[in-house]
Image (cartoon, rainbow, N blue to C red):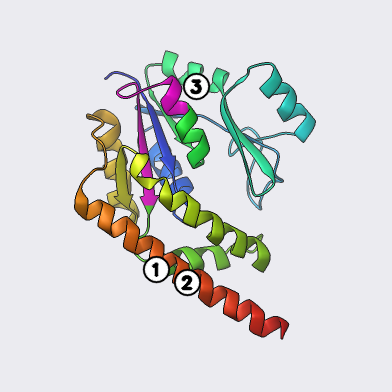
């Protein structure tokens, strides 16, 4: 097995973090999880050094200036990034590196580790309404944050066809199997016309769901 960087990206609620954890837990001999750094506060149950390296903004920016990050991006007012030391540690061990990152970070990784050294996977549930339902189930998210994340998801959908693979995340076990297979195989690109049409229609459905949420917000404030 040739170690490679496997990038998972998705709009909020797409399920990439759940998939990443399942891949790591089920295949610890083949995948090493690169723990990202972030300036956001831990959510309930999250542990420093396990789920994220939780850093102050000044500490994070000092790391950027020192060239410690393979990629980083700002999302929702917070910084997220992948430490080069984490990636090198996993690759040296002979395992695939599994990254759970945003679309800007995925682009930065592809620039430095072009396929087949890396493979990028964009993840979506088949129904846009699932994204909204998952976001609403997060007790840490305010209604304004949910609204922002849905707006953001529209931009992320525009980037979907620049990824190497597309996974429809409707069943966790199936999604995990697909990620493992993609990491071990060749990195073909998403250029199928059916995929393109599906993504376009998905974006339209996401816009409808966002509008439904905006109408609800307007009703609550009225």
Instruction: Tell me if label 1 and label 2 are in contact, CB under 8 Å.
Output: yes
Pick whichever of labels 3 and 2 is earlier in the sequence. 3
Distance in Å between CA atoms under marks 3 and 2? 37 Å
Q: Nearer the viewer, residue 105 or 87?
A: 105
- Residue 158 is covered by the magenta coloring: no
Crowdedness near tag 1: few (<14), some (14–19) or many (≥20) residues, C-alpha within 10 Å:
some
Residue 182 position, x and y percent, is 27, 35
Question: If the image is split into quadrants, where does the N terminus sit?
Answer: top left
Instruction: Tell me if label 3 and label 2 are in contact, CB under 8 Å.
Output: no
Look at 26% across and 31% down and name the residue there.
187
Distance in Å between CA atoms under marks 1 and 2? 6 Å
Question: If the image is split into quadrants, where does the C terminus sit?
Answer: bottom right
**Element marked by disc 3:** helix
Q: Which residue is labeled 3 in the image? A: 87
Instruction: Name the quadrant containing residue 58.
Output: top right
Residue 209 circle label: 2
Q: In the figure, is residue 27 to the left or right of 74?
A: left
Look at 42% across and 45% down and name the residue there.
159
Q: Which residue is labeled 1 in the image? A: 205
Q: In the figure, is residue 178 to the left or right of 11?
A: left
**Element marked by disc 1:** helix
The magenta region covers: 109-123
Pick whichever of labels 3 and 1 is earlier in the sequence. 3
């Amino acid at each position: 097995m040739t170690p490679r960087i496997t990038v998972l990206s998705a709009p909020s609620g797409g399920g990439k973090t759940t998939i990443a954890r399942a891949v790591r837990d089920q295949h610890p001999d083949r995948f090493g999880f690169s723990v990202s750094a972030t300036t956001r506060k831990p959510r309930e149950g999250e542990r420093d050094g396990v789920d994220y390296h939780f850093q102050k903004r000044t500490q994070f920016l000092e790391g950027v200036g020192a060239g410690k990050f393979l990629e980083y991006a700002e999302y929702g007012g917070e910084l997220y990034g992948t430490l080069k030391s984490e990636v090198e540690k996993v690759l040296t061990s002979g395992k695939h590196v599994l990254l759970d990152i945003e679309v800007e970070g995925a682009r930065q990784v592809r620039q430095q580790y072009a396929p087949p050294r890396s493979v990028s996977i964009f993840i979506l549930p088949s129904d846009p309404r699932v994204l909204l339902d998952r976001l609403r189930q997060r007790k840490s998210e305010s209604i304004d944050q949910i609204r922002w994340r849905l707006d953001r998801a529209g931009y992320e959908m525009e980037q979907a066809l620049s990824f190497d693979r597309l996974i429809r995340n409707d069943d966790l076990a199936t999604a995990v199997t697909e990620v493992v297979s993609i990491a071990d195989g060749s990195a073909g690109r998403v250029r199928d016309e059916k995929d393109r049409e599906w993504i376009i229609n998905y974006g339209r459905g996401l816009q409808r769901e966002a509008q439904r949420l905006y109408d609800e917000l307007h009703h609550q404030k009225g």
